[in-house]
Image: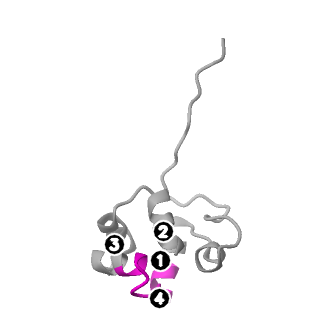
Amino acid sequence: MRFRELRKALQLTQEQMAEKIGDCPQSKISDIERCVAGLDEGIQARLVEKFGVNLNWLVAGRDEMFLAHAPIDRPVVVHFRSPMR
């Protein structure tokens, strides 16, 4: 499932993801990642709200991981390259 891929892309531990989502214990995150538990609509809605997750990607693997807008809680990773000589 793409949930773990999302968490890793956000550079969060399971515990941090649970805190960010809110009202979700770390054990639920683990269960979702191991496909023991489903991803309920409440968690899906919070993922969209907090991180700008594209549900088409999360549920069906279509389109990009994130929606076009940049949500506040999503880390911005900048890669610098040294100038060529």
Cα separation, mark 4 vs mark 1, equals 10 Å
Q: Are circles 2 and 1 on residues that touch, CB within 8 Å? A: yes
Q: Is residue 18 magenta?
A: no
- Picture coordinates of residue 61, whole percent (x, y): 65, 73
* Amino acid type, callout 3: Ala
Label number found at residue 46: 1
In front here: 53 or 81?
Answer: 81
Q: Which residue is mark 2?
A: 50
* Amino acid type, callout 2: Lys
- Kindly report which numbered mark, 2 or 4, lies closer to the viewer in this rendering: 4
- Kindly report which numbered mark, 4 or 1, lies closer to the viewer in this rendering: 4
Residue 25 appears in the picture as rendered: no
Q: Which residue is mark 3?
A: 18
Q: Residue at x 32, y 70 (%)?
A: 19
**Mark 2 or mark 3: which comes first in sequence?**
3
- Picture coordinates of residue 23, whole percent (x, y): 32, 81
**Mark 3 or mark 1: which comes first in sequence?**
3
The local crowd at label 1, few if under 14, some if 14 to 19, many if 20 or more residues have their Cα within 10 Å, is some
Q: Residue at x 40, y 78 (%)?
A: 34
**Mark 2 or mark 4: which comes first in sequence?**
4
